[in-house]
Structures are given as C-alpha cells and as structure tokens.
Amino acid sequence: MATKITWDQANFSFSNNPYTWDEVELIKKIAAGGAIEDPHSYFKENPKDKKKFIKILCKVEGTKFEESKEIKDINIRIQDVELVVNEVLGVNLEVKI
C-alpha cells in the first residue's frame, strides 16, 4: 500500500497542477506498487487501478473523452507508466531493464 499523501507533506505543488489529488495519489501508489517493473502483472491484480490509470494516461497525452467505454484488453507499457509518473509527479523516472 502506498504512503498516504497529506497537503502539508506533499513534495509537489498543486497550484499549477492539472491533476486531481486522487490522480496523484493513485500514481504514487502505482509507482511504489510494482507497475513500473511489470505493468501487465500489476494491473492484472489491480483492475480498478488499471481503469483509472488509462484515464490519467489519456489526460497526460491530451486525449479528451465525451463518453467512456470499457475496454478490457489494453496493454500498458513500462513507457506509459514512466510518462505518467514523470508528468503527474514531476519526477524524472527512468527504468532500465
């Protein structure tokens, strides 16, 4: 389980942050929970996180939705997790395999 973030202890600014508190907390949880090393296994075990992550990924990439449809077989790559962690948390994350 990820460490809870509190307003007074956050190491990032929300004044110019386009992401919600819940989105940032989810990305911190994902970054700490193993999705960076093995996104397929992590999201298979955490399907609710996968659905939320895909919405955040689309937001990071600038894709906007008028309505949503559930797509079950989406592959999330390590590069996707890196991109979202870098964008949402402002952390320059690099995974080398």
Image: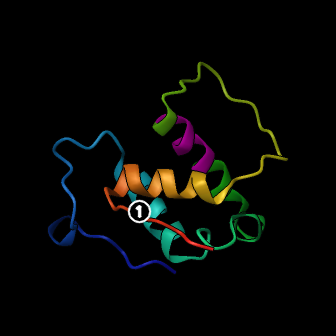
Spot the residue most to the top. Answer: 66
Most frequent secondary structure within the magenta stretch? helix
Residue under the point 31% across and 70% down: 5
Q: Position of residue 95 (x, y in %)?
A: 53, 69
x 21%, y 67%: residue:
11
Q: Residues within 10 Å of mark 1 (few under 14, many from 20)?
A: some
Task: Tell me the kind of residue under disc 1.
Answer: Glu
- Which residue in the protein does label 1 denote? 25
Side of 79 where 38 appears, left or right: right
Please tell me which residue lies in front, 84 or 22: 84
44 relative position to 46: left or right: right
Start-end of magenta stretch: 53-59
Residue 66, horizontal then vertical, whole percent? 59, 18
9 or 35: nearer the eye? Answer: 35
* Left/right of residue 10 with respect to residue 92 in the rendered view: left
Residue 94: x %, y % from top left: 47, 66
